[in-house]
Image (cartoon, rainbow, N blue to C red):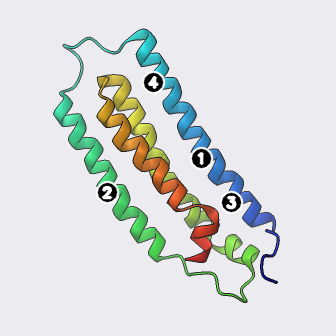
Amino acid sequence: MTNPSPGPAERAGRVVHLALLAGMLTVVGVLVVLRTELGGPEPATAPPLMVMRVVVLALVVGATLGLRILRATLPPLGRRDDRDAWWGRHGGKVIALWALPEGVGIAGGVLHFVTGDGLLLVLAVGWGVAMLLWHAPGRVAAE
């Protein structure tokens, strides 16, 4: 058995992963279009840009630490282990692992909508997409 077909729990994990990635990109896309078409808050009410950049940086750093902590609690899948049983036991932790970058990406989209700063968008969403792809279902179980 070199490449067994995924069981129901692993397939569900793949669907959830794809849904989180697609959902984040959809929400951020809508926020970018709204910002482009409608504009944002008045400059007098917009939060200071440097404060928002620090907030996004803190979110990225905090979520990176959270990912490392959560990842450390997931045992690697052994060669003879049942993949579906592994997903059944650890699926909740894996979904929490994926929710962190999704949340940071959506937060970056919201902060871009409020401030109009492209750096916030690129940093938060880029990091979120990269981490979701890095922690794809096949990699999470294998490492």
Q: Is mark 4 on a helix, strand or loop?
A: helix
Q: Do the residues labelled 2 and 4 touch (CB within 8 Å)?
A: no
| Image location (x, y in percent) of residue 130 | 47, 52
The C terminus - image quarter: bottom right
- Judged by depth in the image, the label closer to the viewer, 2 or 4, is 4
Give the Cα distance between marks 2 and 4.
Answer: 24 Å
| Residue type beneath disc 1 | Leu
Compared to residue 61, the image places residue 73 above or below, namely below
Residue occupying image coordinates x 42% and y 15%: 36
Give the Cα distance between marks 4 and 1.
Answer: 18 Å
Q: Residues within 10 Å of mark 3 (few under 14, many from 20)?
A: many
Q: What element carries label 2?
A: helix
- Judged by depth in the image, the label closer to the viewer, 3 or 4, is 4
Give the Cα distance between marks 2 and 1.
Answer: 19 Å
Q: What element carries label 1?
A: helix
Dot 4 or dot 1: first in sequence order is 1
| Residue type beneath disc 2 | Gly
Q: Which mark is residue 62?
A: 2
| Residue type beneath disc 3 | Gly
| Image location (x, y in percent) of residue 116 | 32, 23
Q: Can residue 123 be seen in this view?
A: yes
Give the Cα distance between marks 3 and 4.
Answer: 29 Å
Compared to residue 86, the image places residue 19 above or below, namely above
Query: On the rendered structure, is 138 left or right of 56?
Result: right
Q: Residue 20 carries which label?
A: 1
The residue beneath circle 3 is: 13
Dot 2 or dot 4: first in sequence order is 4
